[in-house]
Image (tube, helix red, strand yellow):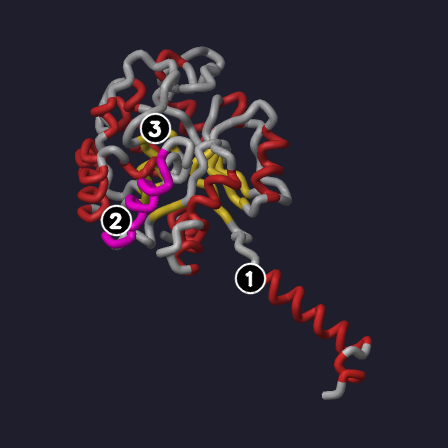
Amino acid sequence: MNQANMFSPLFKTVFFLLLSIILSCTEKRHARVFDVHLHGDTAPEKQMHNLAVNGVYAIAVSTSWSGQLNYNTDNELAVLRGLFVPCPIGIVPYSKQKCFENGNEWPDINWVEQQIKEKKIDFIGEVLTQYYGISSSDTAMYPYYGLAEKYDLPVGIHTGAAGPDHGCPNFKLQMGNPLLLKNTIIRFPKLRIWLMHGGAPFVREFIEMMKTHPQLYADISVLNNPRIVPPKQFDSLMRMYINEGFENRLMFGSDNAEIKMTIAAVEQLAFLTVAQKEKIFYKNAEMFFSKQH
């Protein structure tokens, strides 16, 4: 091709069109993210819009009951709403709002069932037994687990540690051990359970539970927050979990941390393939939250 033809208007148009397509395809960002671990915000519309512009298309949110009702599916985000239970001293940890207007720690089970029937509760969680100072298999939780099993609702259970200033005087670190769930799984074998925060620092116990009970899923919220967990430690944990065969059961969660930062933390795991990242960002969550699971 001679120079005159090379720089013809048609050639330049086609060239720059192809270049823009290549650049858009190689841009390092994920177009789809399902955030399975989110809590309320004083400006929910702003929060939801910020999530949407960063590629989040679905969220599982749990917060105070009055705040919860401000979250609804719209043309940007699909919303699943949870139920905090129990609520230590009647408050949401950290934000310290009343969980329920009447100040109860344990919502009336008949009321809960009615909210499920009215499609106001899509999952039970975050289960805060650890903040309350009891085991996740304490029999006080059985009526709620029973409803979850009856209506095929997912259950998200806090495991691992917690940050400072949560406002729950009965919090016990040892109650975040994933092994404590064994009795619950025996009693409610059809429950769809995900372990929140990947179990750390109970890593060995987390791995044991995930390997022993292949129906369990887990979210990686907090682990993917570099302001809490150093990137090298996150990399090490994720390598371990992938090597243990959990790539089909790990789900993305932000726990209200900066969404760009938590997404980037996963993107920067160079050992993960594109397919593995897609599973973590949204495909595993779609499978878990589907009633066809």
Q: Which mark is residue 290?
A: none
Residue 78 horizontal/vertical position (percent): 55, 43
Tell me which amino acid carries mark 1. Answer: Thr
Residue 34 on the magenta segment: no
Point 43% across, 44% down: residue? 265
Q: Which residue is mark 1?
A: 26
Q: Is residue 13 above or below residue 286?
A: below
Residue extending furthest bottom? 1
Q: Is residue 283 left or right of residue 53?
A: left
Q: Is residue 186 left or right of residue 92?
A: left
Q: Is residue 203 above or below residue 239?
A: above
Magenta extent: 229-244
The tag earlier along the polypeptide, 1 or 3, is: 1
Q: Which residue is mark 2?
A: 240
From mark 3 to mark 2, how far is it between C-alphas?
26 Å
Tell me which amino acid carries mark 2. Answer: Met
Of 98 and 189, which appears nearest the observer? Answer: 98
